[in-house]
Image (cartoon, rainbow, N blue to C red):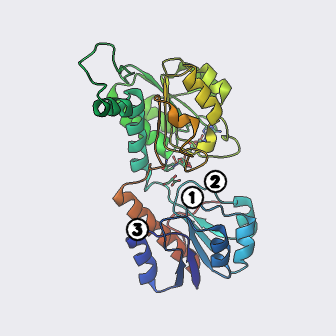
């Protein structure tokens, strides 16, 4: 069996693959993304592909791979980079990484929320640039979580883990939205299912943790931000394309919302001259939700195990049901 690995991985992942002795490995051994031409050449004739969320696996890649390909193992829980209909049609199985990265991503979501609502990057900057002249009653004030209403868009694995972490901050009410009410998930937080528009109107903090689908693409737009309170804070740790960034920029510049925190953008990386980067009330991180050493290492091992099980025709540790 032959496999293509599209990036340098945490060493535990490659070791798990190599030690199994089940396949010969061709790897794009770099921290930088594999160029498209190298990806197309690399997958040719392979039985397995271990890819990243930054690799667009579409018809062209599947055609280049040819009929040997049985398993695509992605080093992510998000699968919006995979042409799932096309993959299904060809009988290729997909391994992904739910659960393992939930805690790290929820922790980062909370960190980003606190950074945005308490204006931490601005405050750090003022200490460095001499703006800190004295203790001033009205200076660098933000918004706190105690007694607040938090709206979670997508009360899935990460959404629930975010709510669990925010509850001890004294959040009074949790609202959530999704494809349909999920009372069994909501009971822990006494969270109320509401339509997206009502969530926007009533929340002090909105945290977007849904997956990117045709139904969620561009969902946070002018209408959405227009409904939010002027004192509200918007956080997105899902995928950049869920947000209309021009509309978000306008909402931040005009004071329609107080602040935003984004771990994900469209495109990634965000060009350094992007208008959102010039705003003090917008905190942007480079997609580091799952970036703890332990999580990334466990993700790589799980991706290797998914790949190996797919090559052997066995049950995958975590298979996406197509
Ligand atoms: P889950 O599948 O557990 O949760 C996804 C949620 O999205 C579900 O609750 C689902 O709602 C919701 N959803 C789907 N469609 C809609 C819609 N139209 N409106 C509102 N909600 C919707 O996935 P995870 O929690 O494990 O991961 C979520 C996403 O987070 C991933 O797909 C990925 O894109 C992103 N992610 C980002 C990371 C980062 O580094 N920033 C790290 C890890 C993940 P319902 O339950 O009703 O079906
Ligand atoms: C994912 O897994 O989908 C994240 O975006 C990266 O961990």
Q: Quadrant of the C terminus?
A: bottom right
Compute the Cα span from label 2 to label 3. Answer: 23 Å
Q: What numbered label is drawn on residue 10?
A: 3
- Please tell me in which quarter of the rendered image ligand 1 is found: top right
Q: Is residue 239 above or below residue 93?
A: above
Q: Is residue 294 above or below residue 28?
A: above
Please indicate whether residue 291 sits to the left or right of residue 265 in the image: left
Q: At 63% from the left edge and 80% from the top edge, which residue is drawn?
A: 46
Q: Is residue 195 visible?
A: no
Give the percent coordinates (x, y) of residue 286: 47, 48
| Mark 2 C-beta closer than 8 Å to ligand 1 | yes
Q: Is residue 130 above or below residue 17?
A: above
Q: Is residue 26 visible?
A: yes
Q: Which residue is mark 1?
A: 53
Q: At 69% from the left edge and 41% from the top edge, which residue is drawn?
A: 215
Q: What numbered label is drawn on residue 80?
A: 2
Residue 292, located in which quarter of the rendered image? bottom left
Nearest the viewer among 159 and 227 is 227
Please indicate whether residue 113 sits to the left or right of residue 123 in the image: right
User: As drawn, which residue projects farthest toward the left?
Assistant: 134
Element on which disc 2 rests: loop
Query: Mark 1, mark 2: which one is toward the viewer?
Result: 1
Circle 2 Cα neighbour tier, 10 Å, few/some/many (<14 / 14–19 / ≥20)? some
Element on which disc 3 rests: loop
| Mark 1 C-beta closer than 8 Å to ligand 2 | yes
Q: Quadrant of the N terminus?
A: bottom right
Compute the Cα span from label 1 to label 2. Answer: 8 Å
- Which of the two labelled residues, at mark 1 and mark 3, occupies the earlier sequence position? 3
């Amino acid at each position: 069996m032959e496999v293509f690995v599209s990036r340098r991985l945490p060493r535990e992942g490659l070791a798990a693959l190599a030690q199994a002795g089940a396949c010969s490995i061709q790897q794009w051994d770099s921290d930088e993304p594999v160029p498209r031409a190298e990806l197309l050449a690399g997958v040719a004739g392979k039985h397995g592909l271990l890819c990243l969320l930054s690799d667009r696996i579409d018809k062209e890649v599947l055609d280049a791979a040819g009929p040997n390909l049985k398993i695509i193992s992605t080093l992510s829980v998000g699968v919006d980079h995979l042409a799932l209909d096309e993959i299904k049609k060809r009988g290729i199985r997909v391994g992904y990484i739910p659960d393992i990265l939930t805690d790290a991503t929820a922790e980062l979501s909370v960190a980003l929320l606190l950074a945005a609502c308490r204006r931490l990057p601005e405050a750090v900057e003022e200490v460095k640039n001499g703006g800190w002249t004295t203790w001033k009653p009205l200076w660098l004030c933000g918004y706190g979580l105690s007694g607040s209403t938090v709206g979670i868009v997508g009360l899935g694995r990460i959404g629930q883990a975010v709510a669990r972490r925010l509850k001890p901050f004294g959040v009074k009410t949790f609202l959530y939205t999704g494809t349909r009410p999920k009372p069994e998930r909501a009971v822990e937080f006494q969270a109320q299912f509401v339509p997206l528009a009502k969530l926007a109107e009533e929340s002090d903090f909105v945290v977007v943790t849904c997956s990117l689908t045709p139904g969620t693409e561009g969902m946070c737009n002018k209408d959405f931000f227009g409904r939010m309170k002027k004192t509200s804070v918007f956080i997105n740790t899902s995928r950049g394309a869920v947000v209309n960034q021009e509309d978000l920029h306008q909402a931040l510049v005009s004071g329609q919302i107080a602040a935003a925190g984004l771990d994900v953008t469209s495109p990634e990386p965000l060009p350094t001259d992007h208008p959102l980067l010039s705003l003090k009330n917008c905190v942007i991180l480079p997609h580091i939700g799952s970036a703890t050493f332990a999580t990334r290492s466990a993700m790589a091992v799980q991706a290797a195990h998914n790949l190996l099980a797919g090559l052997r025709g066995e049950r995958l540790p975590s298979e996406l049901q197509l």
